Image (cartoon, helix red, strand yellow):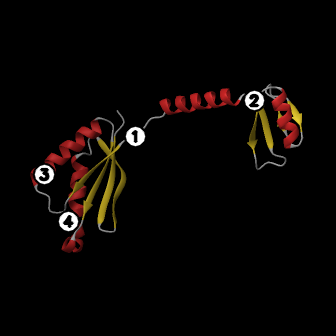
Amino acid sequence: MVIDSDGSQLGVMSSHEALQVAYDQDLDLLCVATNAQPPVCKILDYGKYRFESQKKAKEAKKNQQVTEIKSIRLSPVIDKHDFDTKSKQVRKWLEASMRVKIDMRFRGRMMSRQEVGLKIMNDFIEELSDISSVDKEPKLEGNIMSCVLTPKKK
């Protein structure tokens, strides 16, 4: 099936005939749907088509919103000052409307004391509960416990 540059259907023809029609009009033959029966081709100015498709892609990219995920790592044996410093940093990120992934790595004998790590993770979440909500609950995957916080809607 061949479609002319103005959108009208020229009918079913061989590829050689379609190329000849495109050549006579000083245009290009673009295969739109190769898997269709019969394949659908379009006669058009390929340079103009490519320019318009790039313009659409650039416009779509400009309009899309990219959410950045910041990451911070805690330890099951974290001290109070380090805890406060990290919570202050995460608070800044959440106020800037960024999502935050909190990781806690268990190493060696710490794996047998996962409840201590879970308590620290829950304390961290509670500390930031006024400006954030939990997107993904704390979950242990291998030797890393992680959760994701998102800023609350204002």
Place of residue 93 in the rendered image (x, y in percent of width and height, measured from the top left): 27, 40
Q: Nearer the viewer, mark 2 or mark 1?
A: 2
The residue at which mark 1 appears reads as 67
Q: Residue at x 82, y 26 (%)?
A: 25
Camera-nearest residue between 49 and 92: 49
Label drawn at residue 44: 2
- Name which residue type carries label 1: Thr
Camera-nearest residue between 28 and 88: 28
Place of residue 40 in the rendered image (x, y in percent of width and height, measured from the top left): 80, 41
Label drawn at residue 116: 4
The residue at which mark 3 appears reads as 82
Q: Earlier in the sequence, mark 3 or mark 4?
A: 3
Q: Nearer the viewer, mark 3 or mark 4?
A: 3
Q: Residue at x 14, y 47 (%)?
A: 84
In the picture, which quadrant includes the N terminus? top right
- Name which residue type carries label 2: Leu
Place of residue 5 in the rendered image (x, y in percent of width and height, measured from the top left): 79, 27
Labels 3 and 4 touching (C-beta < 8 A): no
Labels 2 and 1 touching (C-beta < 8 A): no
Q: Nearer the viewer, mark 2 or mark 4?
A: 2
